[in-house]
Image (cartoon, rainbow, N blue to C red):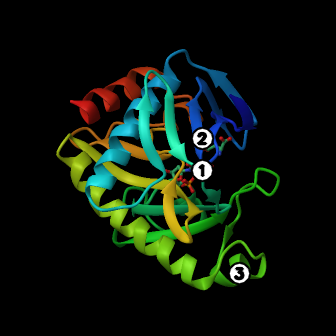
Amino acid sequence: MKLLYKGKAKSVYERDPGTLVMEFRDDLTAGDGAKRETKAGKGAINAGISARLFQVLQDGGIETHFLRFEEPNRHVVKKVEIVPLEVICRNIATGSLVRRYPFKEGQELHPPIVEMGYKSDEYHDPFLNDAIAMALKLCTREELERMREITLRVNDLLKGFLLERGIILVDFKVEFGRWDGRIILADEISPDTCRFWDAETRQVMDKDRFRKDMGEVLEYYREVQRRVLG
Ligand code: TMP
Ligand code: ASP
């Protein structure tokens, strides 16, 4: 297979025209790649979690790029044209939100907050508004509205699914692509791209363990996998 793109945590290959293979690697990065580590098994854990969550979303009526999971660490996906935006949805204030605004750490957000960032390591994924996204010709106004609408639906579906498994969906990041003239969900949904807290103890179960050197990164990823697949 031809390697099309190697990102920080995934490699993308062309399988045949219109179909790609997304390989989840064991690499973990933070700070736009400034901090790097490899954790054996991380790729397969995230591929498994993400496959299950995409299935949940498809069952909930959300159109996605996901076609099938090839164990241990590959997703076969539709080839989409990725919109270079990171769409973030927050149910609880933490992370960059509390660094930028006077929210209290751990404060619940009703309704959830949706923010968008320009996907660029060079510019450090800066948050942007609709006017900037359109002026940069990243997408149209209708596409922005559609991405926000789908993101809130993703939030509702995943929040419920995870809470039944003892996990609070604190916040998450998704990406979208264009396919057959429509906006559909793409990329991955995993502990690398979400914040998950244990519903009882509020223990961190996601990539913040790596970002903040909290230790036991893979142990918690495995626990998320156990609950999501169980
Ligand atoms: P933030 O609080 O650092 O802005 O992160 C919000 C959410 O987005 C959190 O779930 C982590 C996720 N995220 C990514 O998936 N990729 C990124 O590059 C960043 C900065 C955040
Ligand atoms: N996107 C950033 C990186 O991979 C990390 C983050 O999620 O904090 O370097």
- The answer for how far apart the CA atoms under marks 2 and 1 are is 6 Å
- Neighbourhood count class around disc 1 (C-alpha, 10 Å): few under 14, some 14–19, many 20 upward: many
x and y percent of residue 225 in the render?
33, 29
Q: Quadrant of ligand 2?
A: top right
The answer to whether the residue labelled 2 contacts the one labelled 1, judged by CB atoms less than 8 Å apart, is yes
Picture layout, residue 217 above or below residue 180: above
Which residue is situated farthest in the front direction here? 17
Q: Please state if 40 lies on the left or on the right of 2 as rendered.
A: left
Whether residue 154 is situated above or below residue 26 in the rendered picture: below
x, y percent for residue 230: 20, 30
Mark closer to the chain start, 2 or 1 = 2
Q: Position of residue 211 (x, y in %)?
A: 58, 36
Quickly name the residue at label 2.
Answer: 20
* 31 shown above or below 92: above
Q: Residues within 10 Å of mark 3 (few under 14, many from 20)?
A: some
Q: Residue furthest left?
A: 164
Q: Which mark is residue 121?
A: none
Q: Earlier in the sequence, mark 3 or mark 2?
A: 2
Residue at which label 3 appears: 134
Specify the amino acid type for callout 2: Leu
- Closer to viewer: mark 3 or mark 1: 1
68 left or right of 87?
Answer: left
Quick one: 109 or 67, which is closer to the camera? 67
**Which residue is painted at 50% across and 45% down in the image?**
188
Which residue is at the front of the view, 22 or 113?
Answer: 22
Q: Amino acid at mark 1?
A: Lys
Q: Is residue 51 left or right of residue 180?
A: left
Quadrant assignment, res 201: top left
Who is closer to the viewer here, 114 or 48?
A: 48
Residue labelled with disc 1: 79
Within 8 Å of ligand 1, the CB of disc 3?
no
Ranked by sequence position, the earlier of labels 3 and 1 is: 1
